[in-house]
Amino acid sequence: MSDKSVNFQDLIKKMKEATVTAANRPTILGGQFAVDRLGDFLAAWRGRWGTMDQRIWEHISFIEFADKPKEPQYLQRAEIFGEGGHLSLRRDGSRWLWHYVGDPVPLPLEGFAKREECENFWTDDRQIELRRYDEQVILWGKRDREKGHTIWWEDRVAAANLDYPNQKGERVYLDFWRYTQDEQTVFVRYRKLSSGNPADKQGGYNG
C-alpha cells in the first residue's frame, strides 16, 4: 500500500522557489489587429525570429512547421516560440488576437502603436504575484524505425503530418513555463521542443 500523504512543507518550499521576482519577470504584451494586417504584424516581429525558431502554423485543413505560413489566407492560429519568447495568435472573425510572453521587446511595436493593438500587461499600478513552474508535455507520435517510419506516427491522428524539425528522438516533448496567480494558471510560455528518455518526462500529450 503506497503512502499518498501530501507533504505540505515540500509544497510550500516549491511555491516559494517558483515566485517570480523583478529579475525574472517576463514581458507580457497583447492586443488585436485587423485580419488583413497579418503580414505587417509578422514583419514587425521578424527581427526576433532568431530567438523564436519554432513556428507552428494551423490552417483550416492542416498544420505545418515552417518559417512562414503556406496559405496565410486560411490561417487560424500560430505559435511562434523559442528561448527568447512565445508569440501566440488566434483568428477571431475579422480580427487577430495575440499575446506575447518572453524577453523584453522594444516598444512601441512598429506599425501597431494603438492601445488596442499592443498593450503592456505590466501597468504602473498592477501589483500581482506570479509563480513560474517548469513543465513538459509529450506530443503526438512515436518514430519506429523498425517499421520504416522516418517521421513520427500516431494512429489516432494518422492524417496529420507529424514532422517535427530538428528532432531526432523517438518521442518529442514541448518544454514550457506555466505562470500562476493564486495557483491558477494565467500565462503559458512555450520554450522549445526536445527529445529524451520517456522515463524522465511528465505524462500527457497534446490531444
Image (cartoon, rainbow, N blue to C red):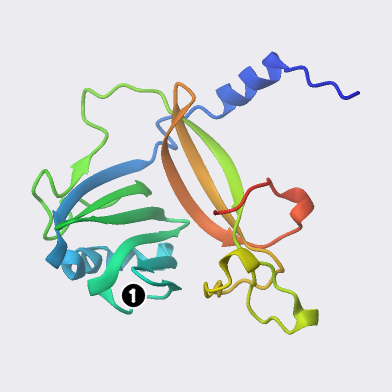
User: Which quadrant of the structure image shows residue 130?
Assistant: top left
Q: Is residue 187 above or below residue 172?
A: above
Kindly identify the residue that appears in the image at 26 percent across and 36 percent down.
Answer: 121
Residue 79 placement (x, y as % from top left): 39, 59
Kindly identify the residue that appears in the image at 69 percent across and 67 percent down.
Answer: 142
Badge 1: few (under 14), some or many (20 or more) residues near its Cα, within 10 Å?
A: some
User: Looking at this view, is 144 or 80 the one in front?
Assistant: 144
User: Which quadrant of the structure image shows residue 134?
Assistant: top right
Kindly identify the residue that appears in the image at 56 percent across and 61 percent down.
Answer: 193
Q: Is residue 5 above or below residue 17?
A: above
Considering every residue shown, the one lying at the far left of the view is: 114
The residue under label 1 is: 68
Q: Secondary structure at mark 1?
A: loop
Residue 140 placement (x, y as % from top left): 60, 62
Quadrant assignment for the C terminus: bottom right
User: Which quadrant of the structure image shows residue 54?
Assistant: bottom left
Inspect this view and state whether residue 104 appears.
Answer: no
User: Looking at this view, is 35 or 82 the one in front?
Assistant: 35
Considering every residue shown, the one lying at the far bottom of the view is: 148
Residue 30 placement (x, y as % from top left): 24, 45
